Image: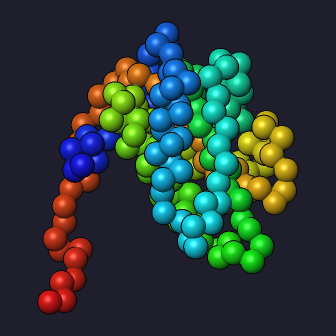
Amino acid sequence: MLKPIETRRSIRKFKPDIPVTKEQLDQMLHAAMLAPSACNSRPWEFIAVTKREILNDIARVHPYAQMCKTAAAAIIMVALPQEGMPSEYFPQDCGAATQNILLEAQALGLGTCWCGVYPKEARIVSIRELFTIPQPKIPFNVIAVGVPDEAPGPRGSFEESKIIYLF
């Protein structure tokens, strides 16, 4: 499992002529829904996009999602804060589900880029309007997906100095 984690990179250039299939999207979303969540609340919904016009619209309204212009697909994670549930944990829950999508895409030979929406109000409003997402649902992020057309080098490494061991 460490290899996909070590080799995953944020991809900002994709091969636009190679599609992402519904089966690949389903596999990534299946992985997302296996993520842990507080009290098994599963506070998420997803919008899967492959229409070029909508991908271009995402790039138009989200200042840091320009890679959607070449991505073959995007997954919009929508958070569902729930009354009576530990709603303050939805960012952690949605983050775990997002990481599962990124790793499953890597395993499928696809690239991704996680573009934050929440908690930036202007981005929440623009994505909410683009996809007609009603309150109290919250657009959480946009994940651009496609076949990479770049190979960024390694980032990050193990830093034992950031660990406190208590044995």
**Of all residues shown, which one is farthest toward the top?**
17
Q: How far from the left and from the top, in percent, is residue 37?
A: 54, 65
The C terminus, quarter of image: bottom left
Q: Is residue 122 above or below residue 111?
A: below
Tell which of 81 and 30 is nearer to you: 30
Q: Is residue 75 left or right of residue 79?
A: left
Residue occupying image coordinates x 77% and y 56%: 137
Q: Please, which colouring scheme is shown?
A: rainbow
Tell which of 67 and 107 is nearer to you: 107
Residue occupying image coordinates x 46% and y 13%: 18
Tell which of 43 and 16 is nearer to you: 43
Residue occupying image coordinates x 48% and y 28%: 24
Q: Is residue 13 above or below residue 132?
A: above
Q: Is residue 54 above or below residue 115?
A: above
Residue occupying image coordinates x 65% and y 43%: 46
Q: How far from the left and from the top, in percent, is residue 3?
A: 21, 44
**Of all residues shown, which one is farthest toward the bottom?**
167
Total numbered labels = 0
Q: Is residue 29 left or right of residue 90?
A: left
Q: How far from the left and from the top, in percent, is residue 41?
A: 62, 66
Q: Is residue 112 left or right of residue 130?
A: left
Q: Is residue 69 above or below residue 4?
A: above
Q: Is residue 160 visible?
A: yes
Q: Is residue 98 visible?
A: no
Q: How far from the left and from the top, in percent, is residue 99?
A: 44, 51
Using the rendered view, name the quadrant where residue 58 is placed: top right
